Amino acid sequence: MKKNTLFILFFMLFQPTCWAFAPTETPEKPPFKMIVRLWSQHHTDSLTSNELIAALQRYPKFCDEVWFLTETPTIQDMDLHRRSAEQMGRMAQTLRQMGIEASFQFISVGHPESSAEKPHPNLFWGTAVGAGGEKTMAQSCPRQASFLRHIEQVMAIYARQVQPYGAWIDDDLRLTQHNPAQAICYCDDCINL
């Protein structure tokens, strides 16, 4: 077995999104469902995609659903999202043919930044501001109308291509720990609500 295939299986075994045990199935207690979170290279890199498919074919009962990760940060240009969504859609169709449901997750506001010195070039709306006035460089203010329109457009691209079972808004909608801001958002727009 190739090292990459072993790594994929190892990663899948130790990075599941959800673990639970359901000894009996009743209408009130549905059966256990294993969901595996995948990264964007699982649908954009053909070698990784092929190894994933081979691993899932070899172990067909390994998971019931996958969550594909959209391109990050979400503020990438639309052409990148379109290409990624087309690839994700093809991979989702392949997985559905194997009996695996396909969903996706996306990062919305943005992850904490450690080295951003200037705003992301595709961020055309206000960035998040902390309670003490700390301005972020790559994290979006969650109330900016342009940001919300962008998120809607990006998610529509993926939804059309993937036809997901579900969509997961990643935990970035939390309002704390968006370094350098510890709490967001205190920009002028949010304060003036």
Image (spheres, rainbow, N blue to C red):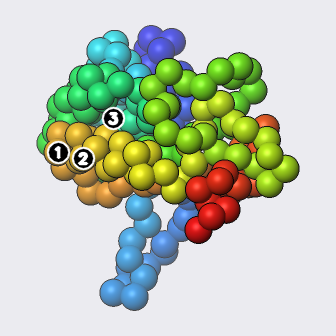
Separation (CA) of disc 3 from disc 2: 28 Å
Look at the image and tell me whether residue 62 can be seen: no
Three-letter code for the amino acid on which mark 2 is drawn: Ala
Give percent across and percent down for residue 56.
Answer: 33, 35
Separation (CA) of disc 1 from disc 3: 25 Å
Q: Residue at x 46, y 33 (%)?
A: 124
Q: For the residues carrying marks 1 and 3, which lies nearer the camera in this image?
A: 1
Q: Residue at x 70, y 55 (%)?
A: 186
- Hey, which quadrant is residue 114 in on the image? top right
Q: Secondary structure at mark 1?
A: helix
For residue 98, the mark is none
Look at the image and tell me whether residue 117 can be seen: yes
Q: Residue at x 60, y 32 (%)?
A: 138
- Graded by Cα atoms within 10 Å as few (under 14), some (14 to 19) or many (20 or more), the crowding at tag 1 reads few
For residue 56, the mark is 3
Quadrant for the C terminus in the image: bottom right
Which badge, 3 or 2, is on the more N-terminal residue?
3
Viewed as shown, does residue 59 lie left or right of 177?
Answer: left
Up-down relation of residue 92 to residue 46 (above or below) = below
Give percent across and percent down for residue 153.
Answer: 28, 44
- Graded by Cα atoms within 10 Å as few (under 14), some (14 to 19) or many (20 or more), the crowding at tag 3 reads some
Which badge, 1 or 3, is on the more N-terminal residue?
3
- Callout 2–callout 1 Cβ contact below 8 Å: yes
Quadrant for the N terminus in the image: top left
Q: Which residue is mark 2?
A: 156
Give percent across and percent down for residue 123.
Answer: 49, 31
- Hey, which quadrant is residue 158 in on the image? top left
Up-down relation of residue 16 to residue 47 (above or below) = below
Q: Secondary structure at mark 2?
A: helix
Q: Which residue is mark 1?
A: 160
